[in-house]
Image: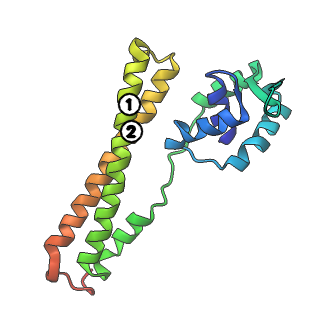
Amino acid sequence: MLGYALLGLLARGDRSGYDLTQGLKDPVGYFWHAQHSQVYPELARLEGAGLVTHSVVEQAERPDKKVYRQTDAGRAALRAWLTADTEVPRKRDELVLKAYSMWQTEPARAADMLRAHARAHAAHLAEFERRLAEVTLRAGTELHDPRSPWFGIQAVLRRGIGYEREYRDWCEWLAGALDGAGQALSPTTP
């Protein structure tokens, strides 16, 4: 998957390894995480497969840098992957797993923990909403053109907004339910 993330970034323009690493933080980092140490070996693999190529750019006060570009084969591979079947992801979510057995703990402590999660999701939600407003201003009419890179950024931000809003609301609901339960909950009641 990292290779496709890199090809997706390179589809937007030539980039150095550093620029690709930054692109993996924002906006790709909103939905796909990769370690910096994975980028260069993956670029070497993509280059070995003929999906990217690089040129060396000389720099006066810094070491020379490699600038990567997607090849025609890389473009074809990305396009094929984009429409290939995708499995519905199976989620591993520790907080949801905790909610499953939350009846075993003290409601007030669990509610406090859930409110902390709600605040974290609210902060992510605010960031996604801020970024969408920024992208909307910068993209203009391209925002609604499915052939524009701006459209993809908008799609990702809208998905993030929906996810963070729902998760925040769920945490707040669960914290409120635990508050309402107070002493009525017994640690042995299923």
Question: Which kind of residue does numbered mark 2 sit on?
Answer: Phe
Residue at which label 1 appears: 132
In-front residue for pair 87/68: 68
- Label 1, secondary structure: give it: helix
Crowd class of label 1 (few under 14; some 14 to 19; many from 20; radius 10 Å): some
Residue at which label 2 appears: 128
Give how far across and how far down residue 19 sits, in percent: 66, 33
When asked about the image quadrant of residue 138, the answer is top left
Q: With 183 as the anchor, is 94 left or right in this view?
A: right
Question: Which kind of residue does numbered mark 1 sit on?
Answer: Leu
Q: Find the residue positioned furthest to the front.
A: 61
When asked about the image quadrant of residue 174, the answer is bottom left
User: Residue 105, which numbered label?
Assistant: none
Q: Find the residue positioned furthest to the top.
A: 141
State yes or no: discs 1 and 2 in contact (Cβ < 8 Å). yes
**How far separated are the C-alphas under marks 1 and 2?**
6 Å
Seen at 66% across and 41% down, the residue is 2
